[in-house]
Image (spheres, rainbow, N blue to C red):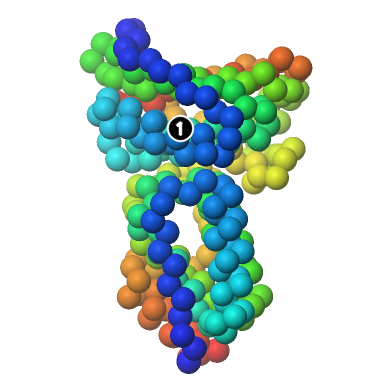
Amino acid sequence: MGDFLLVTIQVDMHDRLAITLQEDLTERIVNDRTRGVLIDISALDIVDSFIGRTLGNIASMSRILDAETVVVGMQPSVAITLVELGLSLPGIRTALNVDRGMDLLRESLERG
Amino acid sequence: MVVGKASEIRVASQDDVVVVRQAVRARAVEIGLNLVDQTKIVTAASELARNTVVYGGGGTVLLESLLDGGRRGLRLTFEDRGPGITDIEKAMQDGYTTGVGLGLGLGGARRLVSEFHITSRPGEGTQVRVTKWNG
């Protein structure tokens, strides 16, 4: 079982920063041969369409690079807002917190 | 209806979008919106501020605290002198975009606020005015 990469987003990201994160992450997945990525967004007090799309891109890209992505820690108010905005984050796996996210990654790697 | 505190912020770059989000959050807390409503108005502001930068070529947003009877509200007016929108109805539809986005900005923002008003003239610019009430 490979090691997991844990990314904690702790700043209010402007769009360029979100794209940088996307690029850095895919590079790390390849260089570290990471099989699982956890993105902790518990510190984010909003997810707008741009950040939502970036998370989706990261999930798709990591899948192509043979890694699973799980987004963890979304605040309830953010989830409510996302759905009304019209973003249901298709293709993105989510978990309540880092521990549950790790369990999810372990399970799917054992199955795979 | 009484207009209380008002302030204007420049919206010209991606960094300004972050500044707008933070200013709207502070004002939403100040007028006593609950956490979900704060999140909704900040998210709507983020979408509209990005539109102002990306499609409008930059502009301004006016933040106004409102008092109407017993309820309090926050009104945001985004203005740009960009190319304008030819077909507003189409622009409001989910999934419609002339740019690089998901096409959720305008329609999505409308669903997150209490009142939504858009005026646009091709060649002259666009004004989007949204209000969130606390009750």
The residue drawn where x is 27% and y is 18% is: B71
The residue drawn where x is 33% and y is 68% is: A97
Rendered location of residue B59, percent (x, y):
59, 23
- The answer to whether residue B109 shows anywhere in this view is no
Rendered location of residue B106, percent (x, y):
59, 33
Q: Residues within 10 Å of mark 1 (few under 14, many from 20)?
A: many
Seen from this angle, which residue lies furthest top?
B1
Q: Amino acid at mark 1?
A: Val
Using the image as rendered, state which of residue A88 and residue B46 is in the foreground.
B46
Using the image as rendered, state which of residue A81 and residue B42 is in the foreground.
B42
The residue drawn where x is 54% and y is 32% is: B49
Query: In the visual, does A68 lie left or right of B82?
Result: left
Considering the numbered disc 1 on the image, is that residue within a helix, a strand or a loop?
helix
Residue A90 figure quarter: bottom right
Rendered location of residue A78, percent (x, y):
39, 49
Rendered location of residue B4, percent (x, y):
31, 12
The residue drawn where x is 39% and y is 78% is: A102
Query: In the visual, does B92 lie left or right of A108?
Result: right
- The quadrant of the picture occupied by the C terminus of chain A is bottom right
Chain for numbered disc 1:
B
A91 versus B95 height, above or below = below
Residue B33 figure quarter: top left
Give the tally of numbered discs: 1
Residue, disc 1: B20
